[in-house]
Image (cartoon, rainbow, N blue to C red):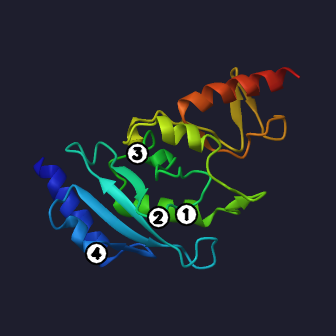
């Protein structure tokens, strides 16, 4: 517990003194507890999110930094993005299986800025670009996004039945999606397999 608090104090100072561009620590959020922070975020200039304001909620367990923080968007403005659910959950591998104790709050913030900045469209045929299973997931998911068993999908190549298949070879509509919760993953694997037989 003492090592977790020491690490959080160090990261808190780093975030206060040298925050990533467009990020500021909400000082009120850390007055009562060091294990829950709110980071105010502004969309990066020159991106689809320029001028928009968001809030990220960080929750740290007693196992931090060996256990990743729980991170999600919160507040009234959740960004419309193919990897952000309308309840604020974020599909980003460093928040789960790719987490390392060498990472920090700042590196998570930079990854989220990068994820949002690389988005090419928020609306597609008058529909918001949320994950394809947004409605189902939001109705059925756990409040803690870390309880979701995400399946991360490499957009450049993937394995189907042990064989590497490039997106050009795969005749599937799902090649631009990067991650899915488990229910959608099973359906996607079945569709991908059936398409590969054609």
Asked if labels 1 and 2 touch by Cβ distance under 8 angstroms, the answer is yes
Q: Earlier in the sequence, mark 1 or mark 4?
A: 4
Quadrant of the drawing holding the C terminus: top right
Asked if labels 4 and 3 touch by Cβ distance under 8 angstroms, the answer is no
User: What residue is rendered at 68% in x and 30% in y?
Assistant: 188
| Picture disc at residue 175 | none
Q: Earlier in the sequence, mark 2 or mark 3?
A: 3
Say if 190 sits above or below 180 in the image.
above
Q: Earlier in the sequence, mark 3 or mark 1?
A: 3
Q: Name the residue carrying label 2.
A: 110
Q: Name the residue carrying label 3.
A: 99
> At numbered mark 3, what does the secondary structure look like: helix, strand or loop?
loop
157 relative to 43 in the view: left or right = right
Q: Name the residue carrying label 1.
A: 114
Residue 184 picture location, percent across and down: 61, 32
Q: Give whichever of 133, 99 is nearer the camera.
A: 133
Q: Earlier in the sequence, mark 4 or mark 2?
A: 4
Asked if labels 4 and 1 touch by Cβ distance under 8 angstroms, the answer is no
Q: Hey, which quadrant is residue 40 in on the image?
A: bottom left
Say if 56 sits above or below 64 in the image.
below
Q: Name the residue carrying label 4.
A: 16
181 relative to 148 in the view: left or right = right
Total residue callouts: 4
> At numbered mark 4, what does the secondary structure look like: helix, strand or loop?
helix
102 relative to 163 in the view: left or right = left
> At numbered mark 2, what does the secondary structure look like: helix, strand or loop?
helix
Asked if labels 2 and 4 touch by Cβ distance under 8 angstroms, the answer is no
Which mark is in front, 3 or 4? 4
Say if 45 sits above or below 14 in the image.
below
How far is the residue under mark 3 from the one under mark 4? 23 Å
């Amino acid at each position: 517990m003492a090592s977790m608090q020491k690490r959080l104090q160090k990261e808190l100072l780093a975030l206060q003194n040298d925050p990533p561009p467009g990020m500021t620590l909400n000082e009120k959020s850390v007055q009562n507890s060091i294990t829950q922070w709110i980071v105010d975020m502004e969309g990066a200039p020159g991106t689809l999110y320029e001028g928009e304001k968001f809030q990220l909620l960080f929750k740290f367990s007693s196992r931090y930094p060996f256990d990743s923080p729980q991170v999600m968007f919160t507040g009234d403005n959740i960004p419309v993005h193919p990897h952000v659910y309308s309840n604020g959950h974020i599909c980003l591998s460093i928040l789960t299986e790719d987490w390392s104790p060498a990472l920090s709050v700042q590196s998570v913030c930079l990854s989220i800025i990068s994820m949002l900045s690389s988005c090419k469209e928020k609306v597609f045929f008058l529909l918001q670009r949320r994950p394809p299973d947004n409605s189902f997931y939001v109705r059925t998911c756990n409040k803690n996004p870390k309880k979701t068993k995400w399946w991360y999908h490499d957009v450049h190549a993937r394995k189907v039945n042990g064989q590497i298949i490039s997106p050009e070879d795969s005749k599937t509509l799902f090649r631009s999606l990067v991650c899915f919760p488990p229910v959608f993953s099973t359906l996607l694997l079945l569709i991908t397999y059936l398409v590969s037989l054609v």
